[in-house]
Image (cartoon, grey):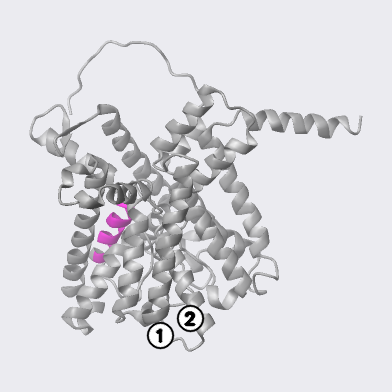
Amino acid sequence: MTLSAPLTLWVRLQRWRHQLTVPQFTAVTGLLVIASGTVILASPLCSTDAVGLWQALFTVTSAITVTGLSVIVVERDLTPFGQIVLAGLIVTGGLGLMAITTFLQGFVQGRSGLRHRLDKGRSLDEFGVGGIGPTFHSILLTGFCVMGLGTVVLYAFGFADIPNPLARLWASLFHCISAYNNAGFGLWANNLENYRDNPVVNGVIASLIVVGGIGWRVINDLWANRRRLARLRRLSLHTRLVLRSTIGLILLGAVGLLLTEHFAPDGTLQKFSLLQQLQITLFQSITTRTAGFNTIPLTIETLSDAGLLLMVVLMFIGASPGGTGGGIKTTTFAILMGATRSTLEGRDDVVIGRRLIPSSTVLRAVGVTLASALFVVLMTLLLQVGPSAAGVPGHEPFSFLEKLFTCVSAFGTVGLDVGVTANLNRWGQLVLMVCMFVGRLGILLLLSALYANRPQARVGYPREDLYV
């Protein structure tokens, strides 16, 4: 009798595992990776006494979700081995937590029927990761090649002020891993503020952020058509839309930040030359949407409310499908703009780039945006409730804009912080962890995990219009 209970539990666990859908399996695996990573990072082998289980849990959640919000200083609070573990967690989350878990699902699940194969392919396509097998290997190969090239450039020309060759190599590699995976983790407490005027560091980090943010699918399309790039129509609509949206948002963010901070009273940028202002705003526009690095101090005092609000919008939009960033995605934003234009022009169909966008795709874009906005509002309201409304004892209460900025930063897996994260109590930090996890999985995958087993109603209803 004593042996039958564990066996029965194991059988039930096996049955439950086989019944998991791809989204459910992804969510469960993500939680398991966070739990195991927390235990490892909290051990004396990885961290100092200043890092307990809670600090390790928050850091691992931020790393797996490639966010970058942190309550520790990486160089000070983590041992060299702990920094390597952190880099490994960033790679695990950044190169596609969904792709990795779906790839592993082929080994842990004993079914290989047609329905399950189709389910894998459909889910991977919907959530922008690509296929498994050769595609997964291509994702890894592309990522490691890009990060390796960036490391060489940073080591030779970027971090030349670091005298120790080994320390310079590790700083170059770590920041390339963090940049390509859009994580925003820096080794130092002030992030990249010491390299504000270094064009090599700014250029390499910004380039890695953009390449990681646009996604492997776009990179693969560009590489496949590298000899015919003069004809942009050879590229898929997805690639063209991602590139246009990315370039447009980068320029819009740079010009917007330049204007908001230039005309702000006692603005941070006013003490810099025009060339420095252009470099700072361009870098900050790129990193605001996806990564979370900063070359200037980010506080409610150093940035204007208009600048912070613009950054909130950029963070909410985020990166592109299949990229290493979060947010509602650039293509979703582009579809919404296309739908708005069609509505204003009195058309019933949404046409982008001379291509008709299916109504199901438009509805999905609307649903993702509305659900994401409601989720961010809910999380911001939770920060207003209880002790977290005032932060830690003795700290001045946070403004609504500070809390909104931090919640959007967590949901968009950006990682920019205006001094809120470390000064929140555990309830507030728990809210941010939920934001990061949901933001990395995506609203679509989360809803699929919750409602995947519910049968769809096959009932037709009479049609009736509403006044809008």
Which quadrant would the N terminus be assigned to in this image?
top right
Q: Residue furthest front?
A: 227
Instruction: Name the residue at 39% across, 48% down.
Output: 376
Q: Is residue 315 magenta?
A: yes
Q: Nearer the viewer, residue 294 or 434?
A: 294
- The residue that disc 2 covers is 168
The amino acid on which the numbered mark 1 sits, given as a three-letter code, is Ala
Mark 1 vs 2: CB contact within 8 A:
yes
The amino acid on which the numbered mark 2 sits, given as a three-letter code, is Arg
First in sequence: mark 1 or mark 2?
Answer: 1
Say what secondary structure mark 1 lies in.
loop
Figure quadrant of residue 468: top left
Instruction: Name the residue at 68% across, 28% down.
Output: 15
- The residue that disc 1 covers is 160
Q: Nearer the viewer, residue 220 or 11?
A: 220
* Residue 466 drawn at (x, y percent): 20, 22
Q: Is residue 304 magenta?
A: no
Say what secondary structure mark 2 lies in.
helix
* Dominant SS type (magenta): helix
Figure quadrant of residue 465: top left
* Residue 312 drawn at (x, y percent): 31, 57
Magenta residues?
307-318
**What is the CA distance from the residue labelled 1 to the residue labelled 2?**
8 Å
- 31 vs 278, left or right, is right
* Residue 327 drawn at (x, y percent): 36, 50
Instruction: Name the residue at 15% across, 73% down.
Output: 263
Q: Is residue 82 above or below residue 271?
A: above
Instruction: Name the residue at 80% across, 29% down.
Output: 8
